[in-house]
């Protein structure tokens, strides 16, 4: 860490005094100013910044909503409506938070798509990638807990169904269930602890995000060509190049976000959640939020309770094994003509699973869900290992610069001062 | 993180042609400035709803509407507590002796000089209406106690007279009079004075 | 790799085919017809006269069974709503009685104030259920957001879009149900305590036909002529519009603010795009997209 002093040279005496005791400015400088970024990054690489913006938005709106929210079964629904009706800009804060959760998942799914398409999970970025899977799991838990808080019908029945899923775990299942409930069924104690945990988890996410960014800055970023930075001509400094691009992309994403908040604030939710929780009446279709639908489809595709639960959790956990299931030497699917086709098939299947998750579990829907579930797992367990072994990848460009300009062409000068770029990605 | 230490001058951005940036005209400088300004305006506007949401909400404001208090059941010498906007208010039906004492005090003896007449409504000298929290640190003073028989604060010993004026510190000022008006001789309306509602 | 593409296409087609076939069986009721609402769309605004009429229908008809617990009298005079004056609201509130504990700790009644909620027709939910055949009539406050209907693929996707989008499922459904009472088709068994409704899922609704033509007398214009017809359809439209407002009292403020926010963000993103281009020009521009074609040039 001491080496940061080489990149950031404090000028004033106060800055020198501070830096020699805590090299904070130097750390920020090396990570977000001088950090070498591959010059061929496309807009898929701005979603990391967008996700950080979304996390911040969720945390801040959440803290503000908690100033007005009452986590008791008797008052939760009305306190949310109090926010919507009486609190100044309360409707804005709540719609930002509710739609922000969906936007967070939109961004994370694009981010995950990018990681899978360009092989960002492959060595040396395995830890970076697994930290990402952990963040995703924490996000899912946070979103689920948060969805129970308005204490509408979907909140209540969603909590009932999901906690019942945990009840399927052999031996300890029922104990876990009653510990979550704090009673004999989902009730006020459940809501109260869910609120507490919903407040806690985002800060755990923030902690893992710090590790995620740290790991990123050790290995350096992957890029669309999937080849490492070899010379200073392959890279540009993070600031201003990546910074301005990230800010631009975040603002554009903000337009998309604002559209939902102001013009379709309830589209991504469920009408039933405006009916106060009622333990005597189950809504006609219990459907989770859209971002859980593919996994919900997998759960229902299996006719056995425990089997469905195992398969559903496996569908997430299997992501963490991608670095070892993929046997190809080439990272980017841009240079993998066969794998690319399978990959797009995988994307289509996942979207179809999402759609099937919203449909009632009967007739043709179940058959379709089973087919799609089968391919989902085949993709990881068979396609990834086998295609990597038998496929002949296209010729990789010699350098990142060549991937931008085409072979043989030269660009004078460089965005990165000589010698600055090569080090961080030398392992990659 | 330590392995990109070999970046001696990474903070110097150099153009592709080797020149330093910022040398190609004022239009670009203006656009950069405008963008920075727009970002700052946007950030400021984003902060506003968060700050505004912390102000009293519509429900709280509506609940703070003027409060009518019926004076007829209050006996002479009695102090009645009422709450308006969550604040304690003393409504005191003063005796002739208490009114006389309050009126007789010379101004020079007062920490916060104010005549008794200025603290009650014309023609209604027997009714004293004051906020019920000590002006020192907000404790509730006890009525009919202390040397001046007005109020005595149990926390730090401040003493008030029968007009609610502070006579002995540490309280710095008199018990304030809330906005109110007489609707009839036996009914007051707290929170509204001269036909105007309190802010 | 035409085979995998073909495979993907077949899979999509098969799934869609199966699901569309199943979708046919799903619908127990026809789709509520879409009404022209003044407040639909990005620039939509509530029609104050309509909200006032809708409130009149609620007050004279619906409120004898349906509560509106989250709505306060003062809401009626707040911006973006029916636009009653504060004095009107005060007078209106005084016509209602609310329960309160007096100084002796006994239950007492006093005239309602602007700050009070609309008093419910039944003292509690159990009483409401007992008086209505076992099920309490739903509260009106957010009912317009609590009701919807399936529009199916691909409408559920286009509904989310600007301009062609659609967010009035709840009010259209409420309007349709109120105007959807008709004689049951031959052979349809209607048990006592239920009524046949064209748009209610399953067709058997526990609410008797609540509205009939001429039931509510609307205020006339200067010449003494009715402004709108006094028909079930008109009452249903007006009360549904009123419920859209009670469910989303800040809708107009939301849409107005949204326009400003989005315009600002578009300008800001334009500026940022220019700045980004200028900055990246120093290193010879940048690369966009998935760029799967790049390798082909090699």
Image (cartoon, rainbow, N blue to C red):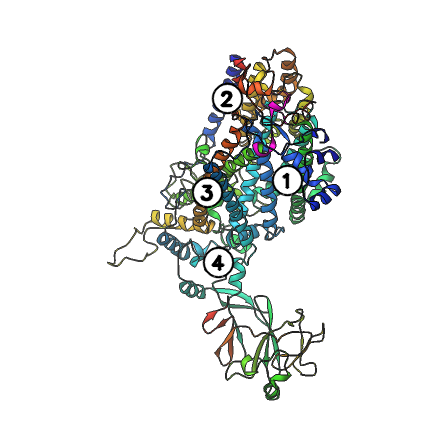
Camera-side residue: C2 or C213? C2
Does dot 2 land on a helix, a strand or a loop?
helix
Q: Is residue B8 above or below residue B77?
A: above
Instruction: Judge depth for marks 4 and 1 and give the one in front.
Output: 1
The boundaries of the magenta stretch are A221-241
Residue indicated by mark 3: C264
- Residue under numbered circle 2: C12
The CA distance from mark 4 to mark 2 is 51 Å
Give me the chain letter of mark 4.
Answer: C
Would residue B188 be counted in the magenta stretch?
no
Residue at position x 38%, y 36% from top? C186
Residue B3 lies, in percent from the top left, at 72, 28
Question: Marks 3 and 4, Cα distance to the nearest angstrom?
Answer: 35 Å
Q: Are marks 4 and 2 on the same chain?
A: yes
Lateral position of residue C133 relative to residue A214, left or right: left
User: Which one is in front, C234 or A220?
Assistant: A220
Residue at label 1? A142
């Amino acid at each position: 860490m001491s080496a940061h002093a080489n990149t950031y040279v404090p000028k004033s005496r106060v800055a020198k005094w501070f830096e020699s005791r805590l090299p904070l400015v130097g750390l920020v400088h090396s990570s977000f100013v001088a950090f070498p970024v591959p010059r061929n990054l496309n807009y898929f690489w701005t979603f990391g910044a967008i996700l950080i913006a979304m996390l911040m938005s969720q945390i801040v709106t959440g803290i503000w909503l908690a100033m007005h929210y009452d986590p008791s079964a008797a008052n939760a629904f009305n306190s949310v409506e109090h926010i919507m009706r009486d609190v100044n800009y309360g409707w804005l804060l709540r719609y930002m938070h509710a739609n922000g959760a969906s936007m967070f998942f939109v961004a994370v799914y694009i981010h995950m798509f990018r990681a899978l398409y360009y092989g960002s999970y492959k060595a040396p970025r395995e830890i970076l990638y697994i930290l990402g899977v952990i963040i995703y799991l924490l996000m899912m838990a946070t979103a689920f807990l948060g969805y129970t808080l308005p204490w509408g019908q979907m909140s209540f029945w969603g909590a009932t169904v999901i906690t019942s899923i945990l009840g399927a775990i052999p031996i300890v299942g029922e104990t876990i269930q009653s510990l979550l409930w704090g009673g004999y069924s989902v009730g006020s104690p459940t809501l109260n602890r869910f609120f507490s945990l919903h407040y806690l988890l985002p800060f755990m996410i923030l902690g893992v995000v710090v590790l995620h960014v740290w790991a990123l800055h050790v290995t350096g970023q992957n890029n669309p060509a999937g080849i490492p930075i070899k010379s200073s001509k392959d890279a540009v400094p993070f600031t201003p190049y990546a910074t301005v691009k990230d800010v631009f992309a975040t603002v554009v994403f903000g337009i998309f976000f604002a559209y939902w908040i102001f013009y379709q604030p309830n589209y991504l939710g469920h009408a039933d959640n405006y009916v106060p929780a009622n333990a005597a009446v189950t809504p006609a279709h219990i459907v989770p939020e859209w971002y859980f639908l593919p996994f919900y489809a997998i759960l229902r595709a299996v006719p056995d309770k425990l089997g469905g639960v195992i398969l559903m959790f496996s569908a997430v956990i299997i992501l963490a094994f991608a670095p070892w299931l993929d046997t190809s030497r080439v990272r980017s699917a841009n240079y993998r003509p066969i794998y690319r086709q399978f990959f797009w098939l995988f994307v289509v299947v996942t979207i179809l699973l999402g759609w099937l998750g919203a449909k009632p579990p009967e007739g043709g829907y179940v058959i379709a869900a089973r087919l799609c579930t089968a391919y989902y797992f085949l993709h990881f367990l068979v396609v990834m290992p086998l295609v990597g072994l038998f496929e002949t990848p296209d010729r990789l460009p010699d350098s990142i610069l060549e991937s931008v300009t085409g072979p043989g062409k030269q660009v004078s000068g460089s965005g990165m001062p000589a010698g600055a770029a090569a080090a961080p990605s030398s392992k990659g | 993180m330590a392995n990109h230490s070999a970046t001696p001058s990474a903070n110097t951005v150099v153009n592709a042609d080797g020149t330093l940036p910022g040398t190609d005209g004022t239009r670009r400088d203006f656009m950069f400035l405008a963008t920075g300004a727009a970002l700052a305006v946007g950030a400021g506007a984003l902060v506003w709803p968060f700050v505004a949401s912390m102000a009293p909400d519509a429900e709280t404001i509506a609940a703070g509407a003027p409060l009518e208090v019926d004076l007829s059941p209050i006996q002479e010498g009695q102090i009645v507590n009422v709450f308006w906007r969550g604040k304690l208010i003393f409504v005191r039906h003063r005796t002739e002796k208490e009114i006389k004492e309050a009126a007789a005090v010379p101004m020079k003896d007062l920490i916060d000089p104010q005549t008794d007449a200025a603290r009650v409504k014309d023609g209604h000298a027997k009714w004293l209406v004051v906020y019920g929290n000590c002006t020192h640190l907000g404790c509730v003073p006890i009525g009919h106690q202390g040397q001046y028989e007005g109020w005595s604060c149990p926390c730090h010993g401040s003493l008030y007279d029968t007009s609610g004026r502070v006579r002995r510190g540490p309280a710095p000022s008199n018990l304030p009079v809330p906005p109110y008006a007489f609707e009839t001789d036996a009914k007051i309306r707290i929170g509204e004075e001269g036909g105007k509602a309190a802010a | 790799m035409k085979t995998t593409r073909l495979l993907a296409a077949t899979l999509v087609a098969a799934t869609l085919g199966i699901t569309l076939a199943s979708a046919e069986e799903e619908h127990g009721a026809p789709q509520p017809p879409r009404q022209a609402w003044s407040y639909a769309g990005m620039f939509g605004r509530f029609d104050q006269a309509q909200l006032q009429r809708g409130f009149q229908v609620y007050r004279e008809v619906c409120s004898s069974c349906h509560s509106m617990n989250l709505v306060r009298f003062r809401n009626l005079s707040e911006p973006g709503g029916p636009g009653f004056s504060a004095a009107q609201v005060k007078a209106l509130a005084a016509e209602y009685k609310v329960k309160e504990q007096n100084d002796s700790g006994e239950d007492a009644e006093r005239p309602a104030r602007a700050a009070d909620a609309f008093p419910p027709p039944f003292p509690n939910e159990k009483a409401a259920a007992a008086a209505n055949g076992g099920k309490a009539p739903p509260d009106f406050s957010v009912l317009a957001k609590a009701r919807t209907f399936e529009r199916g693929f691909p409408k559920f996707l286009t509904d989310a879009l600007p301009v062609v989008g659609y967010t009035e499922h709840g009010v259209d459904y409420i309007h349709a149900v109120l105007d959807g009472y008709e004689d049951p088709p031959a052979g349809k068994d209607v048990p006592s305590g239920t009524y046949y409704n064209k748009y209610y899922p399953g067709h058997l609704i526990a609410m008797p036909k609540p509205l009939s033509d001429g039931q509510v007398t609307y205020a006339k214009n200067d010449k003494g002529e009715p402004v709108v017809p006094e028909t079930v359809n008109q009452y249903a439209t007006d009360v549904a519009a009123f419920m859209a407002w009670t469910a989303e009292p800040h809708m107009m403020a939301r849409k107005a603010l949204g326009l400003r926010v989005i315009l600002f963000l578009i300008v800001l993103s334009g500026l940022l795009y220019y700045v980004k281009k200028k900055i990246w020009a120093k290193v010879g521009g940048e690369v966009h997209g998935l760029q799967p074609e790049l390798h082909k040039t090699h």
